[in-house]
Image: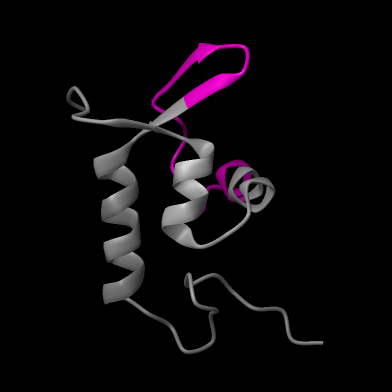
Amino acid sequence: MGTPTKLIRIKDVAAKLGIAQSTAWKYVSSGKIPQPYAKLSAKCTVWDSDEIDKLVEDFHNNANPEHDSVNFKVNSA
């Protein structure tokens, strides 16, 4: 991994994916979203913007009709 061109926080990651911040954290824990680039302080965690943009592009290019708008599996009840 090279040096990122821009670092973004969880609110920006969530906004790019159209999900809540709490959901973004759950997706990080489950591996659906890449791990953070760095933890700058106790309350400041950042991701490489290019990596998140690539994730969004991959979701768009590899859409699955069984998944929701951000390409995550939907549980049918």
Magenta extent: 27-45
Q: Is residue 29 magenta?
A: yes
Q: Residue at x 18, y 29 (%)?
A: 5
Residue 33 visible in image: no
**Picture quarter with the C terminus:** bottom right
Give coordinates of residue 26: x percent, y percent: 66, 47
Is 3 placed left or right of 20 in the picture? left
Give coordinates of residue 41: x percent, y percent: 55, 10
Give coordinates of residue 39: x percent, y percent: 49, 17
Considering every residue shown, the one lying at the far right of the view is 77
Q: Residue at x 49, y 77 (%)?
A: 69
**Residue 50 quadrant:** top left
Considering every residue shown, the one lying at the far top of the view is 41
**Residue 20 quadrant:** bottom right
**Picture quarter with the N terminus:** top left
Up-down relation of residue 71 to residue 21 (above or below): below
Residue 47 visible in image: yes
Query: In front here: 11 or 76?
Result: 11
Query: In front here: 74 or 14?
Result: 14
> In the rendered picture of this protein, how many numbered marks are placed on residues?
0
Q: Residue at x 29, y 64 (%)?
A: 58
Up-down relation of residue 63 to residue 11 (above or below): below
Q: Residue at x 53, y 80 (%)?
A: 67
**Colour approach in the figure:** one colour
Is 62 placed left or right of 70 in the picture? left
